[in-house]
Image: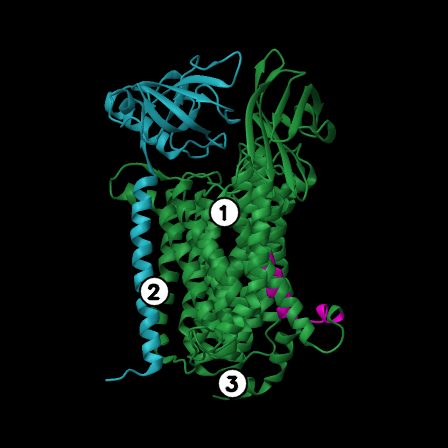
Chain colours: A green, B cyan
Amino acid sequence: MIAELGHIALIVALGLSFLLAAIPMVGSYSNNLLWMRSSRSLATGVFVFIALAYACLTISFMESDFSVAYVAATSNSMLPWYYKASAVWGGHEGSFLLWVLMLTGWTFTVACLSRSLPMAMVARVLSVLGFLTIGFLLFMLLTSNPFDRLLPDTPSEGRDLNPLLQDPAFVFHPPILYMGYVGLSVNFAFAIAALLSGRLDSAWARWSRPWATAAWAFLTLGIALGSWWAYYELGWGGWWFWDPVENASFMPWLVSTALVHSLAVTEKRGVFKSWTILLAIFAFSLSLLGTFLVRSGVITSVHAFATDPERGVFILGFLAIVVGGSLAIYALKAPTMRAVATFGWMSREMFLLLNNVLLIVIMLTVLLGTLYPLIADAMGLGRISVGPPFFNAFFVPLVLVLSVLLGIGSISQWKRTKGQKLASFLWVPATAAVLIGLAVALMYGDEFHWKGWLCAAIGFWVIAVSLRDWWNKASKKRGSTFGQLLNMNASFYAMMLAHVGLGMTVVGGGLSSIYSVQSDVRLVPGDKVLVGAYEFNFSGTEGIRGPNYIADRANVTVSKNGEQVAVLGPEKRRYFSGGNMMTEAAVDSSFGRDLYMAMGEHLGEGAWAVRVYVKPFIMWIWIGCLLMGLGGFVAVADKRYRRLNAVHPEYTATTSAA
Amino acid sequence: MAMHPVRKQRLMIVLFIVVFASVAVGLMAFALRQNINLFYPPSKLINGEAPEGVNIRAGGCVVPGSISRSKTDLAVSFAITDGKGDVTVKYTGILPDLFSEGEAAVVNGQMQGGIFMAEQVLAKHDENYTPVEVAEAMADASAKTGTSHQASCDGMDMSGNKNY
């Protein structure tokens, strides 16, 4: 019964989203206030029914109702309750329901937090979101219904959640990532609404900025969490593999990073308007493209769901409608929007333009590398794959250039900045960065490595510029500088956190790649292996038992200069539900380095194949991402948005009267 | 005729973007040519259709009984097949969890003297998932020879679909 109730809730939600897509939109053109106002109640209705469907699916999982095909495929009665609840998004159908829940959740949030916006704008934004909901719900009901029953042949036991997914990160990574992915649809809807109304001014940019920033922050955290998870779960020691699905989430991130910056220019200076709109369209289109790549099975990937050509065709069709339709509206409406402001070559606008160009070029290289195997296959050039060297060859230098420019751009002023003023500000952080970089390069590695020096210098350059900016701004204010350091605008803290975060990520990514030491060895109990300055002592394995698995755990102590610094217990697990052995790596993390150990196969006679890494600075990557995400949330929480919104009630009057 | 400064700036920006983008595209095309790894099924490898000393990819089913581990280090050798031909793969390092006999594997590396020297071994990541390339190569081979897959691969789901 529960499953049928969920199915009915989905159908009701579909009906409501048809109304949401039509009534307020028509109302906004015929100036029918009642019809426009219906958008809020309809958006709430759609959300309530999707939430109901989601609750039904969760109940089916908690009760282990294996007559539901999806539950039987992704759950097992022995799973702990928290994995049962998160197994809801352990496969294609359920994760798509989560996706739709997020979409309607965002729609509902827009409906709640848009009291100060003109009614026509609210109606159009919610209608566009309703239109997107129709597409996703049709897809779910027609090709991937999570509530399908397995009757009368109900299995007595479920096939289990993929053991790779049985990890705490699985509870958080998909929801946070989807929050970001789907959040981009709000900006898409704002962009389409702006095109339809021909109204694209600072007020519009101010309305859409917090949404873009929120989606970006979620996306940042989601990607970082996924990367951290892959790092310790896959047992390969890497944190980014340029896997097509990673790329699928990274491309919208790159474009939304550009969007967040471009929106700032549109709000403050009224330029880059059409470009901002285009970025909003691209960001969401790329998130749809990602959905297509992940769920159609056209690519080989760690994340690929089971292949189904029908699903692929459906998403591709929807993608074509969304991208084609929005670009058509853009082509018809964008030329009417003109910028009036001007800016000089050395201005914040120009640096933000460069930021956008670089981010888009990076996105295009990633896009090319990701899609090239598909293109080549379609053109009959054979089955090929594009390796990480291709991506790194572009990504690394472009990110370093971007970071260097970031330092200059973030302290330059709108309209025009004197070069001399920049130079007198920047020489201190530049010198500091070069020296810190040298110190790092001399401390690590056997010989001097110019790449290590460059990465460290550029990462610390970004951090140093941000910190000097903070100090300077505080010292220019009245009162004690130390007191003023804590008395800045939220938007300044947001920018500083995000930029320091980027700097740390550059340092972490660069140095951990260059200076990490690896050793794959065969160890028998009593063996020692020296990796870098650390000695790993393997004293044997013991059998342990978890809630739904048994495992061999290695006992390893790590010492440096004769002193014990860590105890590691990597595991090799076998889950009761069957299947192969799973590796559970052991990581000892600290601010300066990670000690990482993963077990390979048992080689017989107590000997094991073991992979050992010492990775300096790797934690900086995730701390940096956390700071970036935190910066995003600080920006969203800025009182400025709420205050300025409230100042403009006249917009409501004029637009609804027009 | 003197240009309006705003137009002039816009022209410069557009020119810059065009030049920058063309250079970027040129470099990308070049880098792509250097870094693409063509996929070869084992039957093409033993026929010498693959270039030696160039990074390529291969994949197939791991032939049962062909895995041999060194007693002293992590060197391992095994054979992969597409049902039409076997090629020996040599690798030093740790094999992925889901690597086992009769299962699909994809290897990255180079051909040297008729042996595939792998730098990376990838196994399917999910019990129901077969790499697309392997599924296709196996399907091709069985279509051409008219024989069914080897016994070891019979249990495999070649389409990559989930079966309940």
The residue identified by callout 3 is A656
The residue identified by callout 2 is B17
Which amino acid type corresponds to the residue marked 1 in the rendered image? Asn
Of badges 3 and 2, the one in the foreground is 2
Q: Is residue A490 magenta?
A: yes
Q: In the rendering, at what x and y percent does residue A40 appear?
A: 57, 71
Which amino acid type corresponds to the residue marked 3 in the rendered image? Ser
Q: Is residue A577 above or below residue B88?
A: below
Q: In the rendering, at what x and y percent does residue B66 appear?
A: 42, 14
Residue at 27 percent across and 84 percent down: it is B2
Q: In the rendering, at what x and y percent does residue A147 appear?
A: 54, 45
Chain for numbered disc 1 = A
Asked whether residue B157 is in view, the answer is no
Q: Secondary structure at mark 1?
A: loop
The Cα atoms of the two marked residues, 1 and 2, are separated by: 46 Å
Q: Which mark is residue A145?
A: 1
Where are the magenta residues, as a range? A483-500
Q: Secondary structure at mark 3?
A: helix
